[in-house]
Image (spheres, helix red, strand yellow):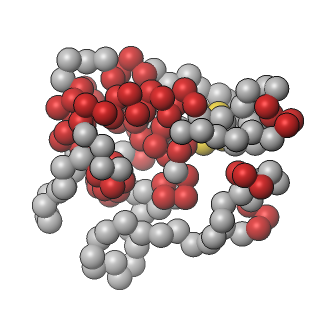
């Protein structure tokens, strides 16, 4: 998960312009859960690989994960230290059958919020529509967001989103 930094940010070790908002408890709707699970399934990782993948991704992320007010957060990755974390990842990557409404148990809410925040930071374009219901989407599959306007792009070419 190598990320390039411009000369200005290289000496800081992170990019001040690259930020991602952390997932909040309020976002954990059934539609959001279904989208996050589909995104995780699309990674094609085994349950035993998820913990190291997320920890390494968070460690190597060149930006900042912030709260709704823009304050930088330190995500509590100790939520992945439980004995049954592999089982949790296995269950999170299983496909849901039609008509099933996903839910999050109180005990795993924090773990889901941390995992989804890291995934959202890594792939912000895919995460734009997590939790949104797209009109006339009868297939219910992953959706592609609209192209990013030039004014939304990072001035540093390697962080610009190519539409």
Rendering quarter of residue 105: top left
Q: Quadrant of the N terminus?
A: top right
Note whether residue 95 is visible: yes
Given residues 15 and 30, the one toward you in this image is 15
Please give the name of the residue rendered at 42% of the width and 47% of the height, measured from the top-left corner: 27
Q: Position of residue 61 (x, y in %)?
A: 59, 34
Rendering quarter of residue 157: bottom right
Q: Quadrant of the C terminus?
A: bottom right
Q: Position of residue 63 (x, y in %)?
A: 66, 36
Q: Position of residue 28 (x, y in %)?
A: 36, 45
- Residue ranking furthest to the bottom: 136
Above or below residue 157? Residue 17 is above
Note whether residue 69 is visible: no
Viewed as shown, does residue 116 lie left or right of 154?
left
Given residues 44 and 86, the one toward you in this image is 44
- Residue ranking furthest to the right: 8
């Amino acid at each position: 998960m190598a990320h390039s930094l411009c000369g200005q940010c290289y000496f800081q070790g992170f990019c001040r312009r690259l930020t991602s908002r952390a997932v909040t408890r309020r976002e954990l709707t059934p539609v959001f859960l279904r989208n996050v699970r589909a995104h995780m399934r699309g990674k094609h990782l085994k349950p035993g690989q998820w913990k190291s993948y997320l920890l390494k991704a968070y460690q190597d992320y060149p930006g900042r994960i912030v709260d709704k007010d823009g304050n930088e957060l330190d995500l509590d990755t100790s939520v992945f230290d439980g004995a049954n974390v592999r089982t949790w990842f296995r269950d999170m990557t299983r496909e849901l059958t039609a008509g099933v409404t996903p839910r999050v148990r109180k005990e795993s809410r924090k773990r889901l919020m941390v995992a989804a925040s890291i995934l959202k930071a890594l792939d912000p374009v895919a995460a734009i529509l997590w939790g949104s219901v797209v009109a006339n989407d009868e297939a219910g599959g992953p959706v592609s967001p609209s192209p990013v306007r030039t004014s939304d792009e990072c001035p540093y070419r390697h962080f610009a989103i190519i539409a």
